[in-house]
Amino acid sequence: MVTDETFFAWLDGELDGEEAKRVVAEVDADPALAEKAEQHRALQRRLASAFGTVASAPLPESLIGAVRPKREVIDFAAAKRSRQSRGGWSGFPQWAAIAATLAVGIFVGTMVPHQSGDSVTVEGGKVYAAAALDQALTTQLASAPAGETRIGLTFRDQSGQICRSFIAPAGSGLACRDGQRWQVRGLFGAPEGQTESYRMAAGMDPSLAALIESAMADEPFNSAQEKAAREKGWR
Amino acid sequence: MALSFSFENELVALLPRLRRFAHGLSRSPADADDLTQATIERALRSRDQWRPGTRLDSWAYRIMRNLWIDTARARSRRDRVEAPEEEAERVGQDPTAGMDAAVDLSRMMLAMQRLPDEQREVVALILIEGFGYRETAEMLDVPIGTVSSRLVRGRTALLEMVGA
């Protein structure tokens, strides 16, 4: 009889080889155990989906401000548009003017300038790929690594957006299409002393693997699907 | 062109996950955002203690967890007089299948709140945040066997509360 600790370690993918096989055999032979596995898988899916709503929601202004309090700049073009809309367009519904002003207010408040060469940028409470990372996600195929950034998996998430994982010496992560940009869903800094080749050999960061697992709706794209998706602009 | 992530940007990119962890630990979204805010402030103040090249996420998660333990202890002393019965009853009601994930969040947060702290943190780190047993043990500074047994108790109690 398998202990609870061993059973759940197996369910969580913590066992390998002979140990895992032994649990599989027990689960296959015991309908009650199989049912328990299914219930706990369902619980985990439910936790992932409920708490996932927090991770995919835009960040509150206050939290971004806490990281970079002095980095906010005013977008003058947006400020000008705001003045124009407040100036009163005859026939322009008042709610629309209010909404526009509000939107501009949020935009101005969350503008964070690019740091030169930095590979992510923050706008409107969301983290986006920038510079070299944006370019790699938009143009590169997994089969054709260019430079030091490699693309891993490409797939659709539960909401139908295309997501791509990437790996580079500075870190690895997952980004999903959001309009014309790539929203970074996770970024994992490279552990100390690990060169790129070491990371490749050691496989994917387990946290990144977990993130992909929870986001992926179906199967990863094969190379033909990946290429076709690029030609269609990742829609 | 090489990728580069500044300390601040890497921290911002971590925020969605840190915020999710905070929701797993805290009893309300407002408390969760306070905890996230406090974690950012602490991380920025202690940034010299983070060694570039090591994992920023484990470091930040650990900061959050320690802050939460401090406030949770203070709070439990304060709240000991309040009876949690009313909240406890609400958890089990209406186990609607396929309900909206955002609605389900408050139900799951409530259920998490009823777990003892040491089970809740393990459930949050492994089942919600996706860390492995070993990483979790290192983050919490406890043996891996302790992580494993707390996880058994925590997830079993959680399943009883919310159904599957």
Image: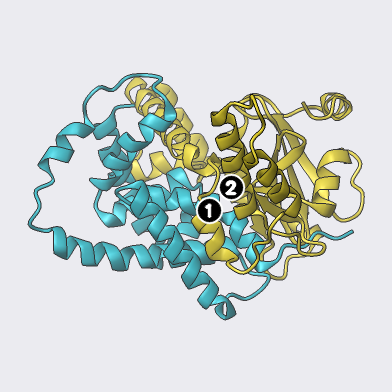
Chain colours: A yellow, B cyan
Does label 2 or label 1 sit earlier along the sequence?
Answer: 1
Q: Quadrant of the N terminus of chain B?
A: bottom right
Label 1 Cα crowd, 10 Å radius (few <14 / some 14-19 / many 20+): few
Do the numbered discs 2 and 1 sit on residues whose CB atoms are within 8 Å? Answer: yes
| Residue B43, x across and y down, in percent | 51, 70
Tell me the amino acid under the disc marked 1.
Glu
Camera-side residue: A76 or A163?
Answer: A76
Q: Is residue B130 above or below residue A99?
A: below
Q: Is residue B51 above or below residue A210?
A: below
Which residue does the image show at 67% across and 54% down from the upper left?
Answer: A111
Camera-side residue: A159 or B29?
Answer: B29
Do pointers 2 and 1 mark residues of a single chain? yes
Tell me the amino acid under the disc marked 2.
Ile
Mark carried by residue A106: 2
Say left or right for B105 vs A161: left
Secondary structure at badge 1 equals helix
Q: Nearer the viewer, mark 2 or mark 1?
A: 2
Subunit that carries the residue with mark 1: A
Q: Which residue is mark 1?
A: A61
| Residue A59, x across and y down, in percent | 53, 48
Q: Is residue A81 above or below residue A73?
A: above
Camera-side residue: A121 or B77?
Answer: A121
Camera-side residue: A158 or B54?
Answer: A158
